Image (cartoon, grey):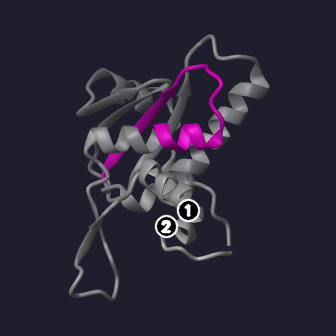
Amino acid sequence: MKRSLTRKERLRTRSEIARVFDKPDIKSGCKGAKLIARRSNLDYNRFAAVLVRKYGNSAERNYARRVLKEIYRTSKHILPTGYDIIVVLYPGGFGFYERKQQYMDLIWRAGFAKTVQVPGMASFNQYKVLSDNHISAFTAALPLLPLVFGLRG
């Protein structure tokens, strides 16, 4: 099964990208990245990763673009449909997890990551999407639990 972004899920032409930049409906930013989105009449989202002009050499640009496309692909289920989304990346020493945190911050600030339906759980209709900060704080505290409860490992 091919999991890459399909052709229809990509913003490809210069005019499609310019239309989002000219009249964006949603803008949000954080250190190292900026999100720009515009409502479309489609029942799916389209995505593009744009890098600023002075972003390293071609290998660094391609790597950053691949990382961002993978982050979008694995988290597109938490976004509402019907948007053309562009993420502008700025240079910096950001790895995969830092870029993922930036992306989650961007969609949270833009109001995209609201709630997700939990299938098969009628009593717990929806839950809020946790950011990576919550998850990393929880995983960092896990080794301390035996000490807190007086257990020896």
Q: Which mark is residue 144?
A: 1
Image quarter of residue 1: bottom right
Location of residue 24 in the rendering, given as x and y in whole percent from the top left corner: 27, 29
Identity, as a three-letter code, of the amino acid under mark 1: Leu
Q: Is residue 42 above or below residue 30?
A: below
Q: Residue 97 is drawn in which quadrant?
A: top right
Question: Is residue 90 left or right of 109 when viewed as pictured?
Answer: right
Which percent across, then down, holds residue 54? 63, 11
* Rendered position, 39 above or below 35: below
Q: Answer left or right for 60 relative to 142.
A: right
Q: Position of residue 53 (x, y in %)?
A: 59, 12
Q: Residue at x 69, y 26 (%)?
A: 61
Q: Which residue is mark 2?
A: 148
Q: Looking at the image, is mark 2 or mark 1 nearer the viewer?
A: 2
**Magenta-drawn stretch contains 48:** no
Mark 2 touches mark 1? (CB < 8 Å): yes
| As drawn, 90 above or below 39 | above
Give, as a single range, the part of the protein colored magenta: 82-102
Specify the amino acid type for callout 2: Val
Secondary structure, mark 2, is helix
> Crowdedness of circle 2 by 10 Å Cα count: few (<14), some, many (20+)?
few
